[in-house]
Image (cartoon, rainbow, N blue to C red):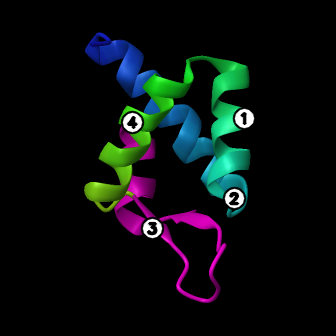
Amino acid sequence: MRRLPDRLHLAKIVLTELKKRPLGRTELEKRTIRQCGTHSAFEGIFRWLVQGGYVEKSEQRHRAPYTITEKGLKLLEGL
C-alpha cells in the first residue's frame, strides 16, 4: 500500500485533470500514470474518489466522461 502523501498526490493529479475538463476513465488514467503512478495505484485512488463522492460519472451517455464534484473541488483546494 502506498503512503498517504503518495495517495494524496495521485488524488491531486486526478482532480486537477478533471477540473480542466471532463475526461473518460481511460484518458484520465493515461494522464495520471504519465505524471506519476501505476495502473494499480490509479485504480485504488480512482475508486476512493468515486466512492467518496469527489468524482462522478455523467449520466448522459454510456461512455460518458467523469467530472469533479463540488466536494472534489473542496478537497482539491485543501491539497
Q: CA distance from mark 2 to mark 3?
A: 11 Å
- Percent across and percent down for residue 33 are 65, 25
Task: Inspect the image, locate mark 3, and give the three-letter code of the amino acid beneath it.
Answer: Glu
Q: Which residue is mark 3?
A: 56
- Percent across and percent down for residue 38 are 56, 19
In this view, the residue farthest toward the bottom is 60
Position of 19 with respect to 50 (left or right) is right
> What's the residue at 36%, 34% (across, down)?
44
Instruction: Inspect the magenta stretch and tell me whether residue 70 lies in it.
Output: yes
The answer to which of marks 4 and 2 sits earlier in the sequence is: 2
Q: Give the structural element (helix, strand or loop) at label 4.
A: helix
Magenta stretch bounds: 55-79
The answer to which of marks 1 and 4 sits earlier in the sequence is: 1
Q: Sort mark 4 into few (<14), some (14-19) or many (20+) by Cα contacts within 10 Å.
A: some
Q: Give the structural element (helix, strand or loop) at label 3.
A: strand
Q: Which residue is mark 4?
A: 45
Q: Which residue is mark 1?
A: 31
Relative to residue 26, is residue 30 depicted above or below? above
The answer to which of marks 2 and 3 sits earlier in the sequence is: 2
Q: Sort mark 2 into few (<14), some (14-19) or many (20+) by Cα contacts within 10 Å.
A: some
Q: Is label 2 in contact with label 3 (beta carbons under 8 Å)? A: no
Q: CA distance from mark 1 to mark 2?
A: 10 Å
Position of 52 with respect to 20 (left or right) is left
The answer to which of marks 1 and 2 sits earlier in the sequence is: 2
> What's the residue at 34%, 61% (across, down)?
71
Task: Inspect the image, locate mark 2, and give the three-letter code of the amino acid beneath it.
Answer: Leu
Q: Give the structural element (helix, strand or loop) at label 2.
A: loop
Q: Is label 1 in contact with label 2 (beta carbons under 8 Å)? A: yes
Task: Inspect the image, locate mark 1, and give the three-letter code of the amino acid beneath it.
Answer: Arg
Q: Which residue is mark 2?
A: 23
Q: CA distance from mark 4 to mark 3?
A: 14 Å
